[in-house]
Image: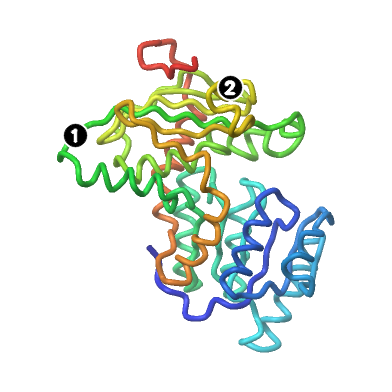
C-alpha cells in the first residue's frame, strides 16, 4: 500500500468519454471531491453534466496540459491533487508521467502498464517527483472474493486448491474496430478483461510457479489456459462471446458471467461490481490505496500469455473448451 495523500481534493480526468469514465466521475463525487478539468479527444461527454457540469473540458491534450500547468503556477494550492486516468491501455504510463510532472498523484485504470519493465520506469519517476501512483484493483474489494481470500488464509496451511475461472464479458462488433481490438494497444483479451482476475487470484493464492503458465487457446475474442500458483492450480477461460454465457446464467445476465470455483465450490461475482470504484477511491483517501508494485504479478502473467505459444495438451483445459 502507498502512503496517505493529506489533501486529495482537486481532480482532473483524462479519458472522459470512455466506457469506464462514469465510474471515476461517480467515485470523485461520492468521496466529496471536485473535478476541475477533463479531457478526451471525443466530445461525447454529456455525462459530465450529471456530476461536474462546471468542469473545464478539452479535446486536445496540449490545451489540457496548458490549463493544468497554468493552475499549478498561478497558485500552489490551485493545481490538481490527482489525475484520474481512464485512457487506452497503451497510454497509461505516459499519462501517469504527465500527472507526476504536474506535481499530482495518479489513479490509473487497469492495466497500469502492458509490460513488467514499465513498472520499474514508473517507480523511478514516482520517487523522483515525490508523488504516488495508485491503481484500480477493485476486485480485491469485492465481498465474495474477500471472503474467498479469508477462507484460504484460515484453511489448512500449504493446501493447494483446484480453481476454475470463467469470465464471459460480451462485446459487440465495435470492439474489434476500436483500440481494444488491437493487441499492441490493449494487450489482447487476456489483458483487457482478464488482468483483474489474474491479480485477484495471485492476491489470494500467491505467486506464479515457474513454467506454470500454459496457454491452450488464444484468439482475438477469447483465450484460455492453465496457471499454476503457489497454492492453486487454475484452469481459466476468458471470452467476449455472448454465446459463451452458460445456459444457467442467461436469465440473470445474458451477456456476462463471472465465476470462480475452488475445489468445486462456486464464488459467483457477476453481481456487486458497480460501486467498487467508489470503494477504491475511499481506500486511497484512507491511506490504503494499491500501488505500482502490487500490480507486478498480474502484469507479468498477462505479458507471458501474450508471448506464449499455444500448447496442445488437453488434460488441464477449462470445461468450456
Circle 1 crowding by C-alpha within 10 Å: few under 14, some 14–19, many from 20: few
- Residue at 62 percent of width and 39 percent of height: 186
Q: Which mark is residue 92?
A: none
Looking at the rendering, in which quadrant would you find the N terminus?
bottom left
Which coloring applies here? rainbow
Q: Is 297 left or right of 121, judged from the image as shown?
A: left
| Among numbered discs 1 and 2, the one appearing first in the sequence | 1
Distance in Å between CA atoms under marks 1 and 2: 31 Å
Q: Quadrant of residue 145?
A: top left
Circle 2 crowding by C-alpha within 10 Å: few under 14, some 14–19, many from 20: many
Residue 265 lies, in percent from the top left, at 33, 30
- Residue at 66 percent of width and 81 percent of height: 72
Disc 1 target residue: 159
Disc 2 target residue: 244
Specify the farthest residue to the left. 157
Count numbered badges in the picture: 2
The answer to whether residue 211 of the structure is visible from this angle is no
The answer to whether residue 81 of the structure is visible from this angle is yes
Along the viewing direction, whichever of 46 and 112 lies nearer the viewer: 46
Q: Is 19 left or right of 289, judged from the image as shown?
A: right
Specify the farthest residue to the right. 43
Specify the farthest residue to the front. 251
- Residue at 48 percent of width and 71 percent of height: 285
Q: Is 315 left or right of 9, judged from the image as shown?
A: left
Along the viewing direction, whichever of 216 and 172 lies nearer the viewer: 172
Residue 280 lies, in percent from the top left, at 49, 60
Q: Describe the element under mark 1 as helix, strand or loop.
A: loop
Q: Is residue 91 above or below residue 225?
A: below
Q: Quadrant of residue 99?
A: bottom right
Q: Is residue 177 above or below residue 225?
A: below
Q: Describe the element under mark 2 as helix, strand or loop.
A: helix
Residue 230 lies, in percent from the top left, at 26, 36
Amino acid at each position: 500500500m502507498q502512503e496517505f495523500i493529506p489533501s486529495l481534493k482537486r481532480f482532473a480526468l483524462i479519458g472522459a468519454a470512455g466506457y469506464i469514465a462514469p465510474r471515476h466521475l461517480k467515485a470523485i463525487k461520492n468521496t466529496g471531491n471536485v473535478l476541475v478539468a477533463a479531457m478526451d479527444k471525443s466530445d461525447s461527454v454529456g455525462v459530465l453534466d450529471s456530476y461536474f457540469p462546471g468542469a473545464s473540458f478539452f479535446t486536445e491534450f496540449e490545451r489540457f496540459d496548458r490549463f493544468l500547468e497554468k493552475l499549478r503556477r498561478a497558485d500552489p494550492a490551485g493545481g490538481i491533487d490527482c489525475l484520474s486516468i481512464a485512457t487506452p491501455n497503451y497510454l497509461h504510463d505516459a499519462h501517469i508521467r504527465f500527472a507526476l510532472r504536474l506535481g499530482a498523484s495518479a489513479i490509473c485504470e487497469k492495466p497500469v502498464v502492458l509490460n513488467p519493465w514499465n513498472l520499474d520506469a514508473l517507480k523511478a519517476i514516482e520517487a523522483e517527483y515525490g508523488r504516488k501512483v495508485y491503481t484500480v484493483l477493485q476486485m480485491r474489494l469485492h465481498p465474495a472474493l474477500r471472503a474467498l481470500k479469508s477462507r484460504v488464509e484460515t484453511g489448512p496451511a500449504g493446501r493447494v486448491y483446484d480453481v476454475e475461472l470463467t469470465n464471459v464479458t460480451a462485446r459487440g462488433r465495435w470492439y474489434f474496430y476500436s483500440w481494444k481490438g488491437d493487441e499492441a494497444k490493449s494487450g489482447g483479451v487476456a489483458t483487457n478483461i482478464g488482468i483483474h482476475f489474474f491479480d485477484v487470484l495471485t492476491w489470494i493464492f500467491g505467486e506464479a510457479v515457474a513454467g506454470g503458465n500454459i496457454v491452450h487457446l488464444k484468439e482475438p475474442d477469447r483465450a484460455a489456459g492453465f496457471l499454476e500458483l503457489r497454492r492453486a492450480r487454475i484452469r481459466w477461460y476468458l471470452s467476449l462471446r455472448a454465446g459463451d454465457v452458460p445456459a444457467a446464467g442467461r436469465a440473470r445476465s445474458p451477456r456476462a458471467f463471472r465465476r470462480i470455483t475452488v475445489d468445486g465450490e462456486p464464488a459467483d461475482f457477476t453481481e456487486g461490481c458497480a460501486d467498487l470504484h467508489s470503494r477504491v477511491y475511499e481506500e486511497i483517501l484512507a491511506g490504503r490505496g494499491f500501488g505500482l508494485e502490487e500490480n507486478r504479478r498480474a502484469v507479468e502473467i498477462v505479458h507471458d500469455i501474450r508471448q506464449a505459444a499455444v500448447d496442445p495438451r488437453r488434460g488441464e483445459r477449462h470445461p468450456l473448451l
